[in-house]
Image (cartoon, helix red, strand yellow):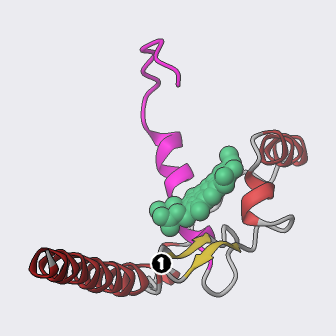
Amino acid sequence: MKKVLKATGITVGILFATLLVLSGVIYMISQQHWNTIYDLSSEIVEVSSDPAIIAHGKHVATIRGCVDCHGANLGGTIFLEDPMVGRIVATNLTTGAGGIGQELNALFAYLKTIPSFPTGIRE
Ligand code: HEC
C-alpha cells in the first residue's frame, strides 16, 4: 500500500513539475513575441482625416467595446496578469511608442485598395 502511495506521489510530482516547466516555457515564448518592436517608420500611410469618418470610428470603437479592453485612449491595458497563465496585454492601438497605429494605418490603406468582394459572410 505504501509503495502504491509513493508511486502515485512521484507520478503526480513529475506531472506537476512538467506542467510547471511547460507553462514557464510558454510564458517566456509569449513574452518574447509580445515584446517584439517592429520598425514601421518607413511605412507611414495617410488615412482619412474627414471629421465625420473619425466621429464614426470613435462611435464604432465605443459600441464594439474596443475602449473597454484597450483603454479609453486606446493606449493599451494589462488585460490579464496571472503567474500561471502569463500576462495578456490589450495592445496599444495608437501611433505612440509601443503602439501598432502605423501598422493599422498601413492595413487600412491596403484594405482601401482591394476590390469589394461581397460574399454575404458576416460573423
Ligand atoms: C475583450 C477585450 C477586447 C476587446 C473588446 C477588444 N480587444 Fe483588441 N485585443 C485585446 C487583447 C487582449 C489583445 C492582445 C492579443 C494578443 O496579443 O494576442 C488585443 C489585440 C488587438 C489588436 C492587435 C492584434 C495584433 O496581433 O497585434 C488590434 C488591432 C485590436 N486588438 C483591435 C481591437 C479593436 C479595433 C477592437 C474593437 C472593435 C478591439 N480590439 C476590441 C482585447 C480586446
Task: Determine if the magenta segment contains residue 22.
Answer: no
Name the kind of residue labelled 1 in the image.
Met
Residue at the spot x=52%, y=21% of the render? 122
Q: Is residue 104 visible?
A: no
- Residue 101 counted in the magenta span: yes
Residue sitting at x 42%, y 21%:
117
On the picture, is 86 further left or further right than 46?
A: left
Q: Quadrant of ligand 1?
A: bottom right
Q: Residue at x 73, y 60 (%)?
A: 69
**Residue 106 in the image: above or below residue 54:** below
In this orientation, which residue lies closer to the viewer: 83 or 74?
Answer: 83
Question: Viewer-proximal residue, 104 or 93?
Answer: 93
Percent across and percent down for residue 89 are 60, 73
Q: Is residue 6 left or right of residue 36?
A: left
Q: Quadrant of residue 80?
A: bottom right
Q: Secondary structure at mark 1?
A: loop
User: Image point 16% across, 83% down: which residue?
Assistant: 6
Q: Number of marks in the image?
A: 1
